[in-house]
Image (cartoon, rainbow, N blue to C red):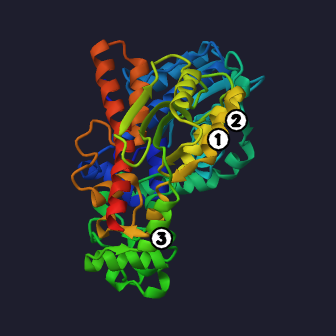
Amino acid sequence: MTNKQPRTSLSKSLFLKGLQCPKALYLHKYNPELRDEIPASLEAVFQLGTEVGEYAQKLFPGGTVIPYGELSIQEQIKKTEDEIKKGKKTIYEASFSYDDVFVKVDILHKGRHEWEIHEVKSSASVKDVHIDDTALQYYVLSGTGLPVSNAFLVHLNGEYVKNGDIEPRKLFVMKDITDDVKEKTDFIRSNINSLKTMLTGDMPEADIGEHCATPYGCDFKGYCWRHIPEDSIFSVTGKFSKRFDLYRQGVVHMKDIPQKFLSGRQRIQVNGTLKKKDFVNPVAVKEFLDSLWYPLYFLDFETILPAIPLFDGTRPYQQIPFQYSLHYLENETDELKHTEYLANPMTDFRKELLEKLLGGIPDNACVLVYNSSFEIQVLKYLAEQFPGFKEKIETIIDNVADLAIPFRRMDLYRWQMNGSHSLKIVLPALVPELSYEGLEIREGSIAMDAYAAMCRTKDKSELDKIRKALLEYCKMDTIAMVRIVEKMREVI
């Protein structure tokens, strides 16, 4: 089996990469060793796309799959041709090549007279890049002589609510984008030619810019951004629309940014970074601490966002809590206590989680969280799903206090925070003896993926290992809040 093709050959992904940045395409072809390390979270994105794609096939059941793992490109194209000759009406991952461009069509379906392209996306809306993606497929299929009448963008319906078995026709939106796709024909042809020509010459000159992250993050950013110093204009957090304008004028380092472009908080960050200087507003910190009361409960949720709804009453990408950690102090001198919950995989755990949570938080408790919008959103979702508990949940929401506020406002700032108010950054800056570094799981997206892995594995030892890592991570989030509050009290 071989997939060797000329260096100037393109695929869907390579064409879109070239549209975003010709230099990235060139590097992919000639210097792939310069690519950034692929983050673990990207694997979850690929898995998600595969899951949604396979579910979309239920819209046109009974089709034939053209596999790509075990077949060469030429074999995939030949098998597609064979299935069409056999009279097959629906083909998944149909493969074609024209003008030295190879594409795979998620769902190729024969309508009354001609074929239809159905491009499946895991998003809940149509984006410009989706049009380009589908237009390339239309160009290639039309070039091979296959009669194509329509092109559809199939995406998730964000308003769909599961009630019983999943209904594919309601789960997905099928948007006819034929006119948009046909209008792109000259654009597609022109860019194919220009990208192929580019690949026959030297690496193109392309400076960094907004295109490095739009519409997709570039996997050669580390190489292209290697000239940017650590304390650069791009390290300044918050809204700062002039970054690239100033960069193009030669302003790269923090120290060279005109003060008029910086907000008050950005000035605190820049001054703190350049002078290794901390900042504290003791009055504001004291006001925040005085707003808390006992019993004091420190709460953190971990959630999943399944693209395909798992439970009745849920929509695509609904935040569903599967775990929480709760540290608490009954009074100022009380010993710190802890309770937690982690759902068993492959069960509808929502009511059990909620009942345990409500049983563990008294009505008069101050509930301290980090970034309250997230926890409040989760609590409101639970109230919506279980209206019998709504009054109790609303009491908790009314008693929520947000520990991120003083750090978002930079009332207490350590220069090591680099302008961030993330809990993962604030903790080691304030409490250096405590950090996430030694943990198996260090961020929420990985926790989400870990729970998904729990649901897939049948290996008990692997299950126990993931469970232990998840419990340690979520517990760290709440003990981190406890220690930060202690440090805040020391500061004032």
Kind of residue indicated by mark 3: Ala
The residue located at (50%, 31%) in the rendering is: 360
From the top left corner, tell me how far across and down residue 67 is, in percent. 45, 21
The residue located at (65%, 15%) in the rendering is: 61
Q: Which residue is mark 1?
A: 395
- Checking the image for residue 187, the label placed there is none
* Location of residue 2 (image quadrant): top left
Marks 3,1: beta carbons within 8 A: no
From the top left corner, tell me how far across and down residue 422 is, in percent. 41, 56
Query: Which quadrant would the N terminus be assigned to in this image?
Result: top left
Marks 3,2: beta carbons within 8 A: no
- Residue in front for this viewpoint, 195 or 164: 164
**Mark 1: which secondary structure?**
helix
* Location of residue 206 (image quadrant): bottom left
Which residue is situated farthest in the right direction here? 112
Q: Earlier in the sequence, mark 3 or mark 2?
A: 3
Kind of residue indicated by mark 2: Glu
State whether residue 220 appears in this view: no
Q: Earlier in the sequence, mark 3 or mark 1?
A: 3
**Left or right, residue 401 beside residue 270:** right
- Residue in front for this viewpoint, 462 or 247: 462
Q: Which residue is mark 2?
A: 391
Q: Which residue is mark 3?
A: 284
What is the distance, in whole Å, between disc 3 and disc 1 at their CAs?
A: 26 Å
What is the distance, in whole Å, between disc 3 and disc 2 at their CAs?
A: 32 Å
Marks 1,2: beta carbons within 8 A: yes
Q: Residues within 10 Å of mark 3 (few under 14, many from 20)?
A: some
Kind of residue indicated by mark 1: Thr
